[in-house]
Structure formats: structure tokens, C-alpha cells
Amino acid sequence: MADDTPTPTSAVAASTPEAMTTSLVERLHFFFSNANLRQDKWMRTEMKENGCITLDQLLKFQTIKSISTDKELLVKAAGELKEEITVDAEKEELRRVVPFDWETMGDGSHLSLCCKNVPLTEEEKSEGEKAFYGAKHEYAVTRDELKALFEPFGKVGIVKLRFGRKEGKAYPLGMAIIEFENEEGMAKASAELLPKEGEAKEIEIKGNKLTFETVKPMKCFQKGAKRARDDKKDDKDKQEKEEEEEIQFEPVKVEMVKGCVIALTGLSDETCDRESIREAVSDILKVTKDIKTSGLYVDYTRGATSGNLRLTESKPEEMKELVAKLNDGTILIANSKVGSAKMLEGEEEVAYWKGFEEFLNNRKRADLEEKRQKKKQKRFSHKGRGGGRRRQ
């Protein structure tokens, strides 16, 4: 199923910082817009629970990282949307100036037109495909082409190509929802395309004359509705939330073994990895290079500049020798000298073991959360719920 995220109009492979900034401004404007948040449950939930979206999260979006992975450039782009987004450069967080809520923003139906008779392609299909889909089963126009068609009326927030489903497979309905960013654009389009008097303006694309109608509000927004989408959960949502809150597990307890940890700083964030660390230190520590039998654990995440070596039992002489040779450059890690190496003692050592125990418990909690989410997704899939949008 096609996703509703529009393609950036600026060149993705922009060669100058100015061009990339322009493209990033466009992406941020879209992702933080009412039009996108109405359909993007992940972003709504993230901002409701944490109040923000982080730069690291945004850089996972395909149409953002394809432009640039430079955080400073992303902050600069966000700074050009001061009426829409606030930036905390130190915490690397972006927030909406006006928080999104369903009661205030609505479902977008009051800003939307339903566009019908959107052209579809005719391609050579097998007899089985024709029987299943019909002769036509792809849109012959893009969201960007439809968006350009309606921009003369006003700024378009999002174009959603509509699909149906048959036996779990998507097929186009020849229909699109055009949602404007503001009431002015919607009013102008309605006056010309759905006039109360006189003839309606005709719009044609690729040989098809488009027809239009208003969009009905979702049931929860219709007059007399008792509940709104996210803010007033139904009983089932409340029950699921309670179940999530009640998930408990037996905490992992870690017994501190003194004199077993070496802290490393100044590691290469480009070439260093666990294997190169293990390769460099194993001989001095007199342990095998086999992960399962060595008794040496490398606490390191690729791309970081610091990490720790943890032994299952103390080897004071070997550890002192290793620290000395790492600090004087006799031993290199990934062909680079480390910034510093030291054996942890006292409060630093206690803090390390406390952090390690916390890490293990967070990982256990995350594993349980993942299992619960998989069960929930499986339950939804059994109800015939399909489709979804890819993050871009």
C-alpha cells in the first residue's frame, strides 16, 4: 500500500547546505503538521508521552536522513519554523509550539475534499490478476501531481490515495482525500468545485475529469459523539493501558566483583568495535578470544567513544599491565591509541555496577514489552486489520 508521506519537492541529493536546509524545513513542516499527526499515531504518542521528538528519532526517518544526517543542519532548519516548532539544541529535542490534541485540531474532515475518478494505470496482467483486481490496479498519478493540481486554491497539507483490501491485498479505489492546511484554502476550493449555485469548475488530470464531494467527520467527531480518538480512551484502550502498567518482572540482581573493570575513553567512533577491542586486549589479560569461554565482557556500542572491559574475576597484574600499555600507546585498538584507560575503584566502580544492573533490568523490561506488542499485533491481525504506512 502506498504511504501518504509526500516526496520532498527540493532535491534529496542537494549539494549545498542551503538547499539541504530548504529540504529539511519542508520535511519538518510536514512531519509536525496537523495533517500528518492526524494519521501518525507513533508521533502523536511520542509527543504526548515525552513532549518532544528527538533529533536521533528524526534522523531515522528515510526522507530526512536521505537529505542529511547533520544534526546542526536539522536544528538550523527547525529554527526557521519558529511559529511551529521550538528547539532545545542542548537536549536535541523538538516540540510543537501548539500541542496537538483531537478536540482542538479535529479529524481534518472540515479541511478536506474527496476527489473521485482518479486515473489508474492499465497494464498487462495475468488472467488470475485481472480476475482478482480487475484490469486496472495501480494509480496513474502521484500524490505530488495531485497536490500541485490543488495548490492554486491554497496550501495542501496532505494527499491521501485511498485503497481497499481484498483477501489481505490492497487495490486502489480511484479516490484521493485532499486536505488543505487552513480553512481559507478549503473555502476557495469548495466555492469553485462544489458551488451552491452555478456550474462547478472542471478539473482534469491525465484524461480523467475529477469529481468532488465533502468528507464526513469520523464517528467520534460527529455531533453527539461521547468520545474522542486519543484523549478519551474507550474501555478497551483503558483495559490495555492498565494491563501495560501492571506488567511486572523479577528484577535482575548483580553482585559486584571488585577490581574487575577497566574504563576506556577516546575510542575511534568510526573504526572501533567489540571484536577489535577483544583482539587487542585478550593476550595481555591471558584470556581466550572466544566470547563464551574467555570470561571477558566488552561493554561497548559501535559509534561510541567510550566503553568498559569487565572480567568475571580480578586479574590485578594483567589489568595493570594492560592499562599501562593502552595509555602509552604500546597497545592500539582498531589501529588507534585510546584517550585513557584506568581500573575503576571506589565510587566509580560502585556506579559502574549499579549502571550495569540497571542496564540488564531495562533490557529485560524491553524484551517483555516487545513480546507484549507482538501479541497485540497478532491479535489485531486476526481481526483482519491490514495495511499501514511506512515511516519516511
Image (spheres, helix red, strand yellow):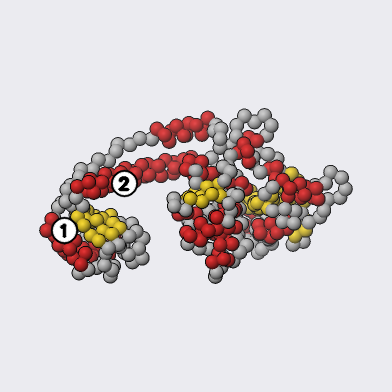
Under mark 2, the amino acid is Phe
* 131 to the left or right of 365: right
Tag 2's secondary structure? Answer: helix
**In this view of the protein, which residue sits in the foreground, 89 or 109?**
89
Under mark 1, the amino acid is Met
**In this view of the protein, which residue sits in the foreground, 56 or 392?**
56
Numbered mark located on residue 359 in the image: 2
Q: Are marks 1 and 2 in contact (CB under 8 Å)?
A: no
Asked if residue 321 can be seen in this view, the reply is yes
Tell me where residue 249 sits by quadrant. Answer: top left
Q: Residue at x 83, y 46 (%)?
A: 195
Q: Is residue 178 above or below residue 285?
A: above
* 103 to the left or right of 61: right
Which residue is labeled 1 in the image? 319
The x, y position of residue 256, in whole percent, is: 20, 45
Q: Is residue 311 above or below residue 224?
A: below
- Marks 1, 2: nearer the viewer: 1
Earlier in the chain: of badge 1 and badge 2, it is 1
Answer few, some or many: residues within 10 Å of disc 2's Cα (few below 14, many 20 plus, some between 14 and 19): few
